[in-house]
Amino acid sequence: MPSTVAGLRRDPAVALTVLVLWILLGLFVVYPLAALLARVLFDHGRFTPDGIVAIITDRHQLRAFGNSLLLGLGVGIGGTLIGFLFAFTAARGRLNRALLTTLDAAVLLPLVSPPFTSAIAMIFSFGPRGLITYELLGLKGVTVYGLASTLCSEVITYFPIAYLTLRPLLAGIDSNIEGMALSLGASRWRVFRTVTLPLTIPGLANAFLLLFAASLADFATPLILAGNNFPVLPTQAYLQITGLFDLRGGAVLSFLLLVPALIVFLLQRYWVSRRFYVTVTGKGAGQTPFDSVAPWVRNALLTACALIAGIVLYFYALLLYASLVVALGANHTFTLAHYRVIFTEGLKAIRDTLIIAGVAMPLGGLYGVLVGYLVTRGSFPGRRSMEITSMIDYALPGTIVGIAYLIAFNEPPVQITGTALIIIACYIFRYGPTGIRTTVALLQQIDRSLEEASRGLGAGSGTTFRRVTLPLILPAFFAGLGVVFIRSMTAISATIFLVSIGWTLITVKILQDMTELALGPAAAFSVLVVVIVFAMIALIGRVLSLFRAQGAPRVTSMLGG
Amino acid sequence: MNQSAIAVNVDGVSKRFTHRVKGEVWAARDVRFTAAPGAFVTLLGPSGCGKTTTLRMIAGFEQPDEGRIRFGDDDVTHLPVNQRNIGFVFQNYALFPHLSVFENVAYGLQVRGQPTAGVAASVGEVLALVGLAGYDQQFPAQLSGGEQQRVALARAIVIQPRVLLFDEPLSNLDAKLRVQMRGDIRELQRRLAITTIYVTHDQEEAMAVSDRIVVMNRGSIVQEGTAEDLYHRPASEFVATFVGRVNLLHGSVVACSNGVASVSALGGLFTARVGATALGVGARTRLVLRPEAIVIDKHDGLPARVTTRTFLGEKVEYGLRCADTDLQAIRASGGADDAIRVGDDVALRFADEALVALPETDR
């Protein structure tokens, strides 16, 4: 049989690829975490729990832990509610195309911006010289820093995650089920309460956990907005390392972060995922053919969405405005000076970021497709553990990954701290997994018989991969690639520990500008990032639509998770 | 007819929608039929003929652009679906996946605010009726397709609806179960005497369950009657081909009077009943000839040659070539004609009663 011969011929190649991937995963995923763990548990080669004890008996650090949980809880609840509002309106509001696009845009904006853009806008609006508090209301001595502003900013930043989780779920509920309840005499409100909502509960739980984890891991927003009276874990870890040069203390703090993160991960994997109802899948029923919401409810929903979308758009308009005036709140004269600054003094950061993103992008895309293909279609020992290992850095809060990399690669045998390589590796292994998941999802939709048909027609497995499988998973490649690029442009939580004089990033520069109160350049940088990212999304969208037209399964979301 | 002798009156109902390519399309156009109390009426037609749209308008899921829908003397055209008191059975059953069998069936009663004890009694009764006693605590995902179908049925009848509506309820079941379920549905419907409107594209299913069949095509009703009416007296070529298998013969009218035409076809002269439309002398016509109405003999009849022979157990199907026309014939096996083989020269006869003459420019 030609297929067995071809299979044998291909086997060494597969074996080699698997080997190389394992070495890379070992070096860039397992080794840093092991190094972090060793640093937490050992002191000068001796096992000691001192480090952990010192931190968990420190009341200040315990408060930071409690604050992190409180913030996560608030963001989880608030973000899920707003995400559900948007998802429900999109799925049941019988919106026309234009309205849907507007809704999507308002949701997309926070998702692809640097994570602290809304935080900066909060400062501009409610800070000491804030547009709203000072200019509009004439209030003085108002402090924007603390739980409330951090919470609001994070909710605005992360609710799109809930939207992306809930919308397909709501759209996937068979409209006949709601129609059935209606035909049995239930009112619309009763149908919502007894049918729609119960069917969405697993999704709501899932969204809550995702948001909780995102807030727990968020580093930039609290750094800007939390202030001294509301310490949270990621910022404490950062300050411990950069302020007190206490790498071990930072490691222990980030380790503390691991506990709730792990609980969330386990809950998601073993509790929530089993509670999705089997019948609420596929079908793609789309718009409900009958009026499942009363006209006045629809209007109320739309108004609520418009309000929130308005806040989002206001934030971004404010950012743009702040980048174009001399000093927001003091001198509103039009100027391009801030852009001049970022393209002269800041040029190095822009260049570095683009180089790093440009290198990480194709490698990350390739990594995603390779691992995704091997773990779904390959047959080699350790397939499952490869899948799990590849997901670790994706699931962990960035602070942990950043500190782990810092500890692991600061000294021989692999001393790459200060190079671009460490940042690129971090991006590939932290954001490449999106491509893995997309590839796996795509391959699960593509029946194996397609590949078998190709073999049956006499094609070898190499030809089959090239002519059949590869074209079908190309969308996943481009989606994965896009995510790596976008995240490379916007991420900060892990890489703030990895930048150096040699290589720096726009996001880090924005943060520096914020702390030095150079708000204009910070705004200009943010606008630049948003523009680059949007251009990239448009490009990827164009590329993806080429494939979609040929009947490849739709890649539901480039940014899922 | 007295209004109260009609349970459901679909009175000139139309529904338009705008298609992306085709522009304005009529999903239903001036659809008009009635169902007597306790009757079983089936809307039959190919996919896209408007039968489901019509059913959904009767249920209240969609609003007609024109026309009225009445239940008895009540005009329900603008009544929301949740106030019509109907029982609906969907093609995919639409069971509530998060509720047990008991809770699924009890839903409609609870919505009506019935006391708990009464609900439990009614649900137990109706579950026994559909043969699902003891399944109360199961969840839909644990049931087979046939069982899910029975739950859907129980849920629709437990509320004692004014009208029971079925939207292709059997198409997700395998062939054997389909035959059994349609018998069960019919029996239950007869026992409870609930007026029923049933949608299907399967003509055999329609004939098996219905008191009356309404055949639809392209949004309009093309013929209405009992199964026998449609089969033996089709009004159009569409009905003739859609209901049962058929040979359509080209012919021309030689004479026509009193609903009987003399038609020349296959090189011979035949007497045929004239369908709904009158035929003028000299007009081109299509003769409807059912396969089982062809008698195959050795001598005495139209000369023909056997081109194919398929033995199917209780019957044998023949392909015949007669006067440059291909015909299909079905004979019960075990008869004298069992000896006929491919290539044999045979003689065909068909009873005059078997032929219906239709105008040619139909479809």
Image (cartoon, coloured by chain):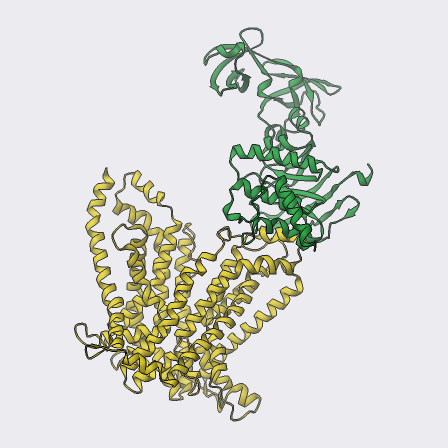
Q: Position of residue A469 (x, y in %)?
A: 32, 49
Colour of chain B, in one word, is green
The number of callouts visible is 0
Decide: is A63 above or below B155. Answer: below
Closer to us: B213 or A229: A229
Image vertical order of residue A25 relative to residue A254, above or below: above
User: On the rendered structure, is B311 left or right of A503?
Assistant: right
Q: Nearer the viewer, residue B318 or A521?
A: B318
Which picture quadrant has residue A240?
bottom left
Q: Residue furthest top?
A: B299
Question: Which one is nearer the viewer's eye here, A63 or A89?
Answer: A63
Depicted A128 relative to depicted B49: above or below? below
Which of the image's four quarters has the N terminus of chain A? Answer: top left
Q: As drawn, is B256 to the left or to the right of A203?
A: right
Identify the image quadrant of the C terminus of chain A: bottom left
Furthest toward the right, the residue is B2
* Rendered view: B42 above or below A180: above
Horizontally, is A372 left or right of B142 in the view?
left
What residue is rendered at 23% in x and 45% in y? Answer: A7
Q: Position of residue B202 (x, y in %)?
A: 58, 34
- Which chain is rendered yellow in the image? A
In the rendered image, is residue A207 in sight? Answer: yes
**Image location (x, y in percent) of residue A29:** 27, 67
Q: Is residue A559 visible?
A: no
Residue A18 x/y as whole percent: 23, 56
Identity of the residue furthest to the left in this view: A413
